[in-house]
Image: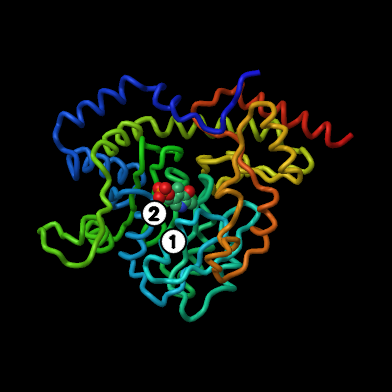
Amino acid sequence: MYKIPFFNYPALYQSRREKYDSILKAALESGYYIMGPELTAFEGGLAEYTTARHAIGVADGTMALICGALASGIQPGDEVLVPAHTFIASASAIHHCGAKPVVVDCGVDHLICPNSARQHITNKTKAIMPVQLNGRTANMDAIRKLSSEYDLIIIEDSCQALGSKFKGKQAGTFGSAGALSFYPSKTLGCFGDGGAVLTNDDEVAEKIRTLRDHGRGSDGEISMYGYNARLDNIHAAILLFKLSFYDEEIEKRRSLARIYNDRLSGIEGLHLPPAPDALSDHFDIFQNYEIESVNRDALRHYLHEKGIGTILQWGGKTLNQYKSLSLSGEATYADGMTDRFMMLPMNTTLLDEDVNRICDEIITFYKNQNC
Ligand SMILES: *Cc1c(COP(=O)(O)O)cnc(C)c1O
């Protein structure tokens, strides 16, 4: 039986090899490697795609979070609310601003729980960082309500959500700044690290541009301590090309999610993400297909034996479970979920028949469980 790996990096390159080769060749021959025309063109394309006023290319998603948070005014002593179910980079970015990440719970859709967030607000709480996880944008009405009630800055970790929408509005455009990641397995992935910050605020944008380039302003003057956090030109050139067929890729992901949903919904012991067309307020792009299973480890083992790769996000732990960091906060649902959550293959190199085979195996697994 043929194998279905969780992710197939070489296949991504092979799918459009000649085009990638010619883009790289042109970028290398041009002699512009840092802050060149490809970067400017990509930033323009990304701003247009997301409807953000500014899109600023940076070295990776983590630097996008750090620059976005610093430029939005996060300072030492501040507390920032962050959901437990996220990548460590969300919390590190807050820490590197000198602020304190405070962990809050997530809900059944695996996104930040606004009620839990409300319970963790103190007089030091300066900002909230919703993480638009797995390609889904949180209920931003609830987050905006909290933000206006308590005067909280919104910094979105939208690293998994480019193109995802809530009530028609794009992930990354709701608050002061939104971070994007172009890590190779992300929906808009490049062949290395890359990231961008979205913002509608001219001042925040100017600060991010300064922070990413050693604290140098457009006049060359140093106005603050900055970083070397620029997005390379060759990556920008590849990303600009990939953006041109990004909507097709999202449609492909949504159609694979539809197959998973049609075939697996109703299985007892399995909890699926909402179907692509389930809720009209949400447009999900399915960066991941994350499920919960009450027999998680046995199911993973069974699929592995059948040649099907699965993964536990963040290696299976939520932020509050990293003992050496001992973060404050509380996350009851997220804690319990770490025994059940897992990701099924979800990427544009998969064929419908691959997803159908994965579903066949899962259905067989549960039939055997129940007798
Ligand atoms: C990928 C990701 C990041 C940033 O990752 P980089 O590897 O730094 O680009 C941040 N937060 C979340 C939730 C992510 O999935």
Q: Which quadrant holds residue 328? A: bottom right
The answer to whether residue 218 is left or right of residue 256 is: left
Task: Give the residue drawn at x 46%, y 73%.
Answer: 79
- Which residue occupies the extreme right position in the image? 371
Instruction: Name the kind of residue labelled 1 in the image.
Output: Ser
Q: Which quadrant holds residue 257? A: top right
**Depicted 188 relative to depicted 144: above or below:** above
Q: CA distance from mark 2 to mark 1?
A: 8 Å
Q: Earlier in the sequence, mark 2 or mark 1?
A: 2
Image coordinates for residue 324, horizontal then vertical, percent: 54, 65
Task: Give the residue drawn at x 19%, y 39%.
Answer: 33
User: Would you say the beta carbon of the disc 2 residue lies within 8 angstroms of ligand 1?
Assistant: yes
The residue carrying pointer 2 sits among few (fewer than 14), some (14 to 19) or many (20 or more) residues within 10 Å by Cα, namely: many
- Which residue occupies the extreme bottom position in the image? 123
Image coordinates for residue 206, horizontal then vertical, percent: 22, 60
Image coordinates for residue 241, horizontal then vertical, percent: 31, 31
Name the quadrant of the N terminus: top right
Q: Which residue is mark 2?
A: 62
Q: Is residue 82 visible?
A: yes
SS for tag 1? helix
For the residues labelled 2 and 1, say whether their Cβ atoms are less than 8 Å apart.
yes
Task: Give the residue drawn at x 62%, y 68%.
Answer: 330
Between residue 267 and residue 293, name the one nearer to us.
293
Task: Give the residue drawn at x 75%, y 39%.
Answer: 298
Q: How many marks?
A: 2
Between residue 10 and residue 108, name the one nearer to us.
10
Image coordinates for residue 192, horizontal then vertical, percent: 36, 39
Q: Which mark is residue 92?
A: 1
The answer to whether residue 274 is left or right of residue 22 is: right
